[in-house]
Image (cartoon, coloured by chain):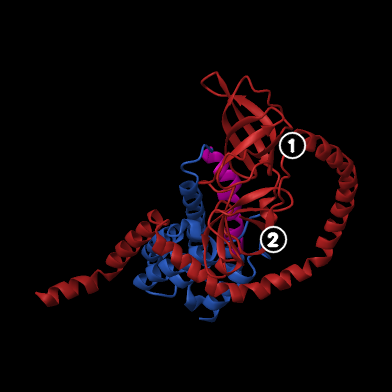
Chain colours: A blue, B red
Amino acid sequence: MLIVLGTVLIQFFFNEVLDIQGIRPDLFFILLIYLAFRLSATQTVWVAFLLGILQDILFHPSVLGLSPLIKTFSGFILAQLIHQSFLRVRVFSTISSVLLIFLSHVIFNWVLFIEMPVDFNYVLIHYSLPEFLYTGGLFILANYFISLYPETE
Amino acid sequence: MLKRIIDFFVNRRFQISTTVLLFLSFIIFIKTSHPAIRHLEIWAGDVLAPVKEPVVWFRDLMETRETNEILNRRLIHLSQEASRFSSMADENKRLRSMLDFKERSEYNLLSALVLSEGIHKSVNSLLLNRGKKDSIQVNDPIMNVDGVIGKIFFVGESTSLAQLLIDPNSRLSVRIEPSGAKGILQWYGGNRYLIADIPNTMAVQPGNLVVTSGLSDIYPGDLPVGVVRELSPAPDGFTHIVYGDFLVNFNQIREVFIILE
């Protein structure tokens, strides 16, 4: 509960402090990954939806609905993958989570730019990749200190 | 029968929850302009503003020294320009009075703090600490000392939401000086924009200033917007596509000015 509250507070109050040239990490997604390994499948998708709604209301109300859509889908994928035995190996669970972070950023920006005369590669290089690297980097750092699976902490 | 239905929902609660939540998210996303959704956003802004404002105030306090230095330098530069323009203004006034022109009025500007920006670089709206109680209305333009930033698109009691020019849905009627070529500006990613359908006959050059045209009901004319960087021939062969950079640094907006009617 403290971690959830702490993440929300950090993302809300210190969003500008975390800014690097306009790039900010998606701490809610990192939180979702950790909660997915500690909650049931149904709880995970509900948490994903609520985190997405909260994120959109707080930060990008002009596209309200997009974050819960992507996070709910990500929560669904996480819930399906978690019980796979190979994910018990730390490396594989980290790689799977990082790939999911990458996919979510790519899809988010692709949907936003879909009606604009902008090349997909430009969106990928200037938006999706920097955001993924920042969020993914923070996730890997957090994962070094806190294991994804609660029983191995 | 009822027990079987209940068992069905209980056994498949994960799949059913996922489907319902995905469907709900999709509906919210495509109905994002619905008044009920807008009211929810503004309600959240009104609730969060008293919490966020002290944090914003503290952050601005920390940046005061640096901001002061920047402003002092700008002040010196502007003072020099002002004295140069003063003599030009006197001459202009004299010539205008000779032609019996009316005096132009100054804009009524209201400053506003930015309470919240986005997480994603590509989603560009701002939550401001001004609302209905400050006489803010929908479509009031917003700008800073560098140029036009966007417009208000939803107003709450004490907060409002602003749509930036760097939003995929944003469009702006502009004029390119000195040729006078007019077009519709749209964001092109990063700090760039494009203006399509500029006739080949218009003498547009890199370095030209782009300003608001004044043809819109929303933005007054002659507000600075950007600078032309390059031109590219359009497929039709009769027009150009003009590419440029915005004058405003959208990564560092802390305070804006709202142009009141």
Q: Which chain carries label 1?
A: B
Tell me where residue A143 sits by quadrant. Answer: bottom right
Tell me where residue B97 sits by quadrant. Answer: top right
Q: Is residue A140 left or right of residue A55?
A: right
Q: Is A130 in the magenta? A: yes
Q: Give the range drawn in magenta.
A: A119-138
**Element at label 2:** strand
Q: Is B97 in the magenta? A: no
Residue found farthest to the left = B1
Query: Does residue B228 sit above or below B21 in this rendering?
Result: above
**Residue A108 visible in this rendered orientation of the protein:** yes
Residue at 81% in and 61% down: B67
Residue at 65% in and 44% down: B191
Amino acid bearing label 2: Glu
Q: Which of marks 1 and 2 is nearer the N terminus?
A: 1
Do callouts 1 and 2 point to residues on the same chain? yes
Work out whether residue A106 or residue A9 is closer to the camera in this orientation and state it: A9
Q: Where is residue B136 in the image (x, y as percent from the top left)?
A: 58, 62
Query: Does residue B46 sit above or below B253 in this rendering?
Result: below
Q: Mark 2 points at which residue?
A: B255
**Residue A21 visible in this rendered orientation of the protein:** no
Residue found farthest to the bottom = A2
Residue at 53% in and 37% down: A119
Instruction: Look at the magenta stretch and give its main secondary structure.
Output: helix
Q: Name the residue under label 1.
A: B100
